[in-house]
Image: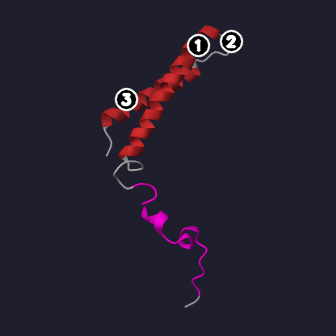
Amino acid sequence: MSNPLFDRFILTLIVVNSICLAIEDPLSNETNKVLEQLELIFNIIFTVEMAIRMVGLGVWGNKVGLVEMSHLRSDPHEVVGTRDHSGP
């Protein structure tokens, strides 16, 4: 369901992003400007990745969406678990 190359790319970006967050220096303005630009780029890439996965897994698009999932179409009492089953 998922492409291993895409997953490896995203995982590499997560590691690089973590390293950038770790080397951020609150006293250095020059370093922080570069890291702020990198953070923006990472945020854009991660947002696009989230949208691609949501489409691919069926939240948007032609596949089964959230509203059409069976547990959301069932009786609200069954979902919450408040129905009394003691009667006829």
The tag on residue 17 is: none
Q: Please determine whether, in this image, residue 32 is positioned above or below residue 70.
A: above
* Residue 75: in magenta span: yes
Q: Amino acid at mark 3?
A: Phe
What residue range appears in magenta?
Answer: 65-86
Q: Earlier in the sequence, mark 3 or mark 1?
A: 3
Q: Earlier in the sequence, mark 2 or mark 3?
A: 3
Please tell me whether mark 1 or mark 2 is closer to you in this view: 1
The tag on residue 9 is: 3
Query: Residues at badges 1 and 2 in contact (C-beta under 8 Å)?
Result: no
Q: Which residue is mark 2?
A: 27
Q: Please determine whether, in this image, residue 44 is positioned above or below residue 36.
A: below
The tag on residue 33 is: 1
Left or right, residue 33 beside residue 2: right
Q: In the displayed orientation, state which residue is furthest to the bottom.
A: 88
Q: Amino acid at mark 1?
A: Lys
Give the residue drawn at x 53%, y 20%. 20
One can see residue 35 in this view: yes
